[in-house]
């Protein structure tokens, strides 16, 4: 029973929802079977994790019926199924009650069915007013379409005398905007994915020429304009013009886009900047601007979008632009979030990187020595940071051991690392070993300047120590 759909769903509820679900099951409006109340009491009496030997149908049956009644596993299975249905109904109601649109839309249908025209029209007007205040998302335009579709149906069945357009234009326009917006968004995702993953190409032959949007009136709709510029940026080989168009729209136009959608659009800008700005200083200055704008507008730290790569990228850009206070401030703000423990590996490694840039090398080792890392790519970063720290602390033996260990690690995991990054890290190891052997050879020999192979990780740091 511990691994059933019922328990998996119940484990997702927070304490408040668990109390509300208990009240929901206890309500005779939703449930008239007292055994379901007892079954929920039995489940709620256990603390997570739900061990197989504790949470069983047999124990649940005894909790409900006592020791004297003959065990009936089939009945317990049916009871669990009924409680699962109640839980699904509860979750659905809890989610939908926060959507005023769902309530209003169903009331429109109810008013139409019972001929309450004044309330029907009032509700229709209220929904459209709210559309102008809400975030502009794919869902918003879908809602607009189905409301206009319902209004068209109402006019056609209740008012139509064979004349008039019964709201066809508005319905078709809402459908077109919904369609082209979604077409642009998914096409942008496909183009972005195809640039990241080799061989990821379009398979469908049913292609709509989205370039025609730029010549149509739809381009005048702000959200269509933004996503069309994103589409052009991802599609075009000449990205600079489209980059500045999209950047200007996102930075200067006050359009209430949902935060996840904004973050995706800024990601397109960040990826494009890497290809556009070839000089390292220009690139990091541009990325710094994009990150700062997102921080100032409460985008980056939103629970819906914050992922480990954002933490590492933000700190890297701040450090490359000599903005140590900015990196420290960012880490502090992440740690203020309730969910920050999900990113402990990234936060601690970022703190170590900041301390390395402050030349606090013993403190760097304190952090990475106690840090337990599961992510393989973070392990690679940690090993490079450890090696660099050993170098500055002149820990010769430790550094030789760390470099050789790193080489073995790369060989063991080479199937999971791209060829480029594998070679870059191997060149890092080879260059450091040559440098260390030259530095610690006795007597010192006159040698030619050490050549830096390409590609190589930590290139700027390598240059600085050579």
Image (cartoon, grey):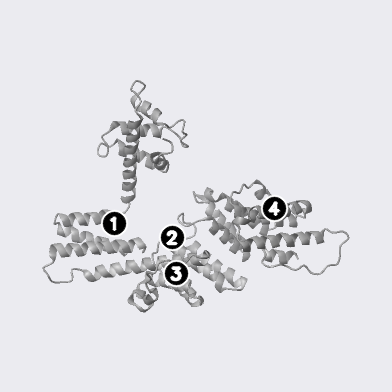
Label 4 vs label 2: CA separation?
A: 40 Å
Return the mark for residue 260.
2
Earlier sequence position, callout 3 versus callout 2: 3
Residue shown at 15%/56% (left/top)?
A: 116
- Mark 1: few/some/many CA within 10 Å (<14, 14-19, 20+): some
Marks 1,3: beta carbons within 8 A: no
Label 4 vs label 1: CA separation?
A: 58 Å
Earlier sequence position, callout 1 versus callout 3: 1
Return the mark for residue 408.
4
Residue shown at 41%/69% (left/top)?
A: 227
Q: How many labels does the image show?
A: 4
Tell me the quarter of the image containing the N terminus: top left
**SS state under label 1:** helix
Earlier sequence position, callout 4 versus callout 2: 2
- Mark 3: few/some/many CA within 10 Å (<14, 14-19, 20+): some
Earlier sequence position, callout 4 versus callout 1: 1
Q: Is residue 239 above or below residue 298?
A: below
Label 1 vs label 3: CA separation?
A: 27 Å
**SS state under label 4:** helix
Which dot, 4 or 1, sits closer to the camera? 4
Q: Is residue 78 above or below residue 355?
A: above
Label 3 vs label 2: CA separation?
A: 13 Å
**Residue 148 percent location from the top left of the image:** 24, 64
Residue shown at 29%/63% (left/top)?
A: 144
Residue 57 sits in quarter: top left
Marks 1,2: beta carbons within 8 A: no
Residue for badge 3: 250
Residue for badge 1: 101
Q: Left or right: 67 with respect to 191? A: left
**SS state under label 2:** helix
Q: In front here: 420 or 240?
A: 420
Q: Is residue 32 above or below residue 326?
A: above
């Amino acid at each position: 029973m511990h691994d059933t759909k019922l328990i998996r769903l119940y484990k997702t509820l927070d304490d408040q929802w668990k109390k509300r679900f208990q009240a929901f099951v206890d309500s005779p409006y939703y449930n008239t079977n007292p055994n379901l109340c007892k079954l929920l009491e039995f489940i709620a009496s256990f603390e997570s994790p739900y061990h197989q030997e504790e949470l069983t149908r047999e124990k649940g049956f005894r909790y409900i019926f006592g020791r004297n009644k003959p065990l009936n596993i089939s009945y317990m299975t049916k009871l669990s199924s009924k409680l699962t249905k109640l839980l699904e109904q509860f979750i659905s109601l809890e989610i939908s009650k926060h959507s005023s649109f769902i309530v209003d839309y169903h009331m429109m249908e109810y008013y139409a069915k019972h001929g309450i025209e004044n309330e029907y029209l009032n509700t229709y007007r209220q929904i459209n007013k709210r559309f102008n205040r809400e975030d502009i998302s794919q869902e918003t335009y879908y809602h607009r379409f189905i409301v206009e579709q319902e209004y068209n149906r109402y006019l056609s069945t209740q008012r139509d005398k064979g004349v008039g357009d019964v709201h066809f234009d508005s319905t078709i326009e809402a459908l077109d905007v919904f369609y082209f917006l979604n077409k642009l968004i998914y096409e942008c995702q496909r183009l972005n994915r195809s640039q990241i993953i080799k061989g990821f190409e379009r398979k469908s032959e049913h292609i709509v020429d989205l370039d025609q949007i730029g010549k149509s009136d739809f381009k005048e709709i702000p959200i269509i304009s933004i996503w069309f510029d994103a589409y052009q940026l991802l599609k075009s080989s000449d990205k600079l013009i489209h980059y500045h168009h999209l950047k200007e729209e996102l930075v200067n136009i006050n359009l209430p886009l949902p935060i996840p959608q904004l973050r995706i659009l800024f990601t397109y800008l960040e990826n494009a900047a890497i290809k556009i700005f070839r000089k390292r200083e220009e690139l990091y200055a541009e990325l710094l601007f994009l990150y700062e704008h997102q921080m100032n507008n409460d985008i980056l730290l939103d629970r819906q979008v914050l992922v480990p790569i954002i933490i590492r990228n933000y700190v890297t850009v701040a450090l490359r632009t000599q903005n140590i206070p900015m990196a420290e401030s960012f880490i502090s703000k992440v740690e203020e979030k309730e969910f920050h423990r999900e990113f402990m590996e990234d936060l601690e490694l970022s703190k170590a990187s900041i301390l390395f840039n402050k030349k606090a090398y013993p403190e760097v080792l304190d952090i990475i020595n106690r840090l337990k890392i599961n992510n393989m790519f973070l392990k690679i970063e940690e090993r490079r940071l450890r090696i660099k720290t050993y170098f500055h602390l002149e820990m010769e033996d430790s550094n030789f051991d760390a470099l050789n260990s790193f080489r073995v690690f790369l060989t063991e995991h080479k199937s999971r690392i791209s060829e480029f990054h594998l070679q870059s890290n191997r060149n890092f190891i080879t260059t450091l070993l040559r440098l260390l052997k030259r530095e610690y050879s006795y007597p010192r020999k006159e040698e030619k300047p050490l050549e830096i192979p390409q590609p190589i990780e930590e290139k700027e740091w390598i240059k600085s120590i050579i």
